[in-house]
Structures are given as C-alpha cells and as structure tokens.
Amino acid sequence: MNSTLFSTIVRPVLRVLACAIAVVIAACAPLPPAKPTATGPLVFPAPPDEPRFVYERTIYSSGDVLVQDREAALRGLLTGQGAAGEGLNKPNTIAVYQGRIFLSDSGEAVIRVFDVPNGRHFRIGEGDPGKLSKPLGIDVDRSGNLYVADSGAKSILIYNKDGKFLRRIGNAKWFDRLANVTVDPKGDRIYLVDIGGVGSQQHRVRVVDAASGEHLFDFGKRGKDPGEFNFPRDLAVGKDGRLYVVDSGNFRIQVFDRGGKFLKTFGAIGRQVGQFARPKEIAADPAGNLYVVDTAYGNFQIFSPEGELLLFIGSRSERDGPARYMLPSGIYADEDGRVYMVDQWFRKIDIFRPYNLKADGGFLGQRSDAKAASK
C-alpha cells in the first residue's frame, strides 16, 4: 500500500476506531447490563400498574462478575462473546452482604462468592479446615460472616467474609436432616431448621447462642396443628423480630415470637395467588416484607409482615429468560432491597432492583469501572 495513502486515509481511521474501542473498554463493568426488551425495562407489576421492581440482570457464571482486562474486553467487542467463567453446577441458596453474593453449590460442595464491587470470584470450603460436604442453607451476619448449614456434616460451619474458617456449631447428634440456618439480625441467636424425615418426629427449629454455640431451646414437632411442622424448610426474621417459618408440607407460613411461641399462620394449599404448592425458601427485606419461593409455581410471592399478598414475580417455564423458572430454590433480599432469585434448572441468579433505586445505587451498584479501564 502506498505510504502516503496509508498516512492520509487509513491511519486516521484506525485512530478513530482505537478511540472508540478505548471508550467501550473504559465503560466495561463487572456485570453486563440487562438486555433491553422491545418495550423497555422489564418491570413488575406490568403497566398500567405502578412498577415496584425492575429486572436488573442475571448471573450464570463467574465471567458475569469478573472485571475484564483490555484484551478480554476487546475480544468480546470484536467477537460478540461474553466473558468465560466458571458456571454454576447445582446452586441452592443465596445470601448477600454489601454487594458480595454468597451462593451454595451442592454439586461442587462449595460456596461460590461473587464480589461484585471488586469484580472478583472465589470459592469457600474446598479444603481443611472448614472443608464442606453438602452445603445447603446459608446466611450472613452483620459483619459479613458466613454461616453454612452442611447437611453432610450435620453441623453449621462459620467463615469470615473472605472465606477464612472460624468455627463449627453442632454435630450429627443434633439433627436428623439439617436444612437451613438463619442468623438473628440482633446477632445474639442462630436458628437452625431440622427438616426431619418421613420416619422422624424431629421437624423443628433449634435455637442456639450465636457467641457460644450453646443450645438454648427448640420449638415445633411433626404435625399439622398450629405450631407444628411437616418438613420445615427455612426461617426468616422479620423487621419486627418475629420468626417466619416455611412449613412446606403443610403449605403455609407460620409466625412465632422470639421465644418460639406460635402467633399466627398464613397461606394454604391451592392454585390461587397467595396460596402455595411447594413453598421452599423465605426472605425478609429491610421494610419487613416477606418473599416466599414456590418451586412448583416457579415464582416468588411478596407478602406484608401480616401475610397480605402484595405482588408475585416470575412464572414456570421450560425456556430460560428473565423471571422464568423451572426449579427455583433460593431467595434473598439485601440491605438495599434488591432481590436475588436462584434457579437450579437454569443454573442462574436473577436480580431485581426496587424501581425507585437507581442502577448505580446501593452496594451492588458500586461497580468499579475505573478498575476495568485501568487493567
């Protein structure tokens, strides 16, 4: 090619293209933005009702969180391919602390950590001390410490937010089938859900002292009367301090005070909104509203603290997509009101943002674009 032609025509074009690519790279963030729909953002409830939540994005692998360097970002720009990463094997339950997402993966026998603000991914529980066997339910306390209900070890394993093993609570004599763990927001108690079994009467909640690990008391036994359980699955502590237990086999949510005294119940078996077919997990948001996953219906229903149905999000589907679920398993509401829904079949985490919270608001919104641009 003639050198004069290259200097006067080709080189300026390449400079413009390079600048354009640099701008795109500088704008890269650990999480890709939600794909727009033909009619705009996906909101719930749908128009003309006033929206309360907007679908934000989905996490399928570590590649959806890791900050891309310049080379990876350029490759993605040119090929249209997303960042490669470790996919989810058998995701179960989820907990979130200041933008750091903890996900139990029983297929890999680890806890996956998606540190969104810092654009990194790591795993907890792979080696001794603190090696996990069959992690199921998880929760975090006010300091970000992680509590894991290990069904295989029949004990609670506790780590700091960076994955350092701290201690263990309980043993095989404590449980028939350990299913879940919930830390009281006050920080003084831990609630352990024993799902029991077909031949067991130990369908109950065990309460222990958070500091010492000492067993304090139990409440519940197998049955269908008020205060009794049939395969309890999860527990959430409401803003008012009351305990909300998913009584899965009785298709209801039971409410207790901090001492384990039965107060009320809501929900029943049925096909109408506000009813349940296979309730599995429950979460409470900062306002005290409750989020209940129903695996059979492929959705989560939102209730007031008194059990009044406010809204439901999601539908059962054989095709993946935003708010479409085949086997939803876990749910969590973070400090800013974002809601995280786990689906085992599609191996994903869907994230929903309160409509009045800006995309860059809250802990999850504090993604470091500068880090992406500087690498």
Image (cartoon, grey):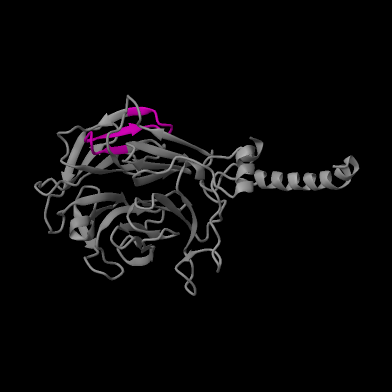
Q: Horizontally, is 296 left or right of 8 in the view?
A: left
How many marks are shown on the rendered structure?
Answer: 0
Residue at left offset 29%, top offset 58%: 295
Residue 72 against residue 359 in the figure, above or below: above
Q: Position of residue 52 (x, y in %)?
A: 47, 64
* Quadrant of res 207: top left
Residue at left offset 46%, top offset 44%: 61
Nearest to the observer: residue 70 or residue 154: 70
Q: Position of residue 18 (x, y in %)?
A: 74, 44
Q: Position of residue 81 (x, y in %)?
A: 56, 48
Residue 164 in magenta stretch: yes
Nearest to the observer: residue 306 or residue 65: 65
Q: Horizontally, is 359 left or right of 133 in the view?
A: right
Residue 170 in magenta stretch: no
Q: Residue lying at the far front in this picture: please name it.
A: 1
Residue at left offset 20%, top offset 36%: 215
Q: Residue lying at the far right in this picture: please name it.
A: 4
Q: Residue lying at the far bottom in this picture: please name it.
A: 48
Query: Is any part of residue 284 visible from this angle?
Result: yes
Query: If the image is split into quadrants, where does the C terminus sit?
Result: top right
Query: If the image is split into quadrants, where does the N terminus sit?
Result: top right
Query: Is any part of residue 212 visible from this angle?
Result: no
What segment is highlighted magenta in the picture? Answer: 148-166
Residue at left offset 21%, top offset 55%: 247
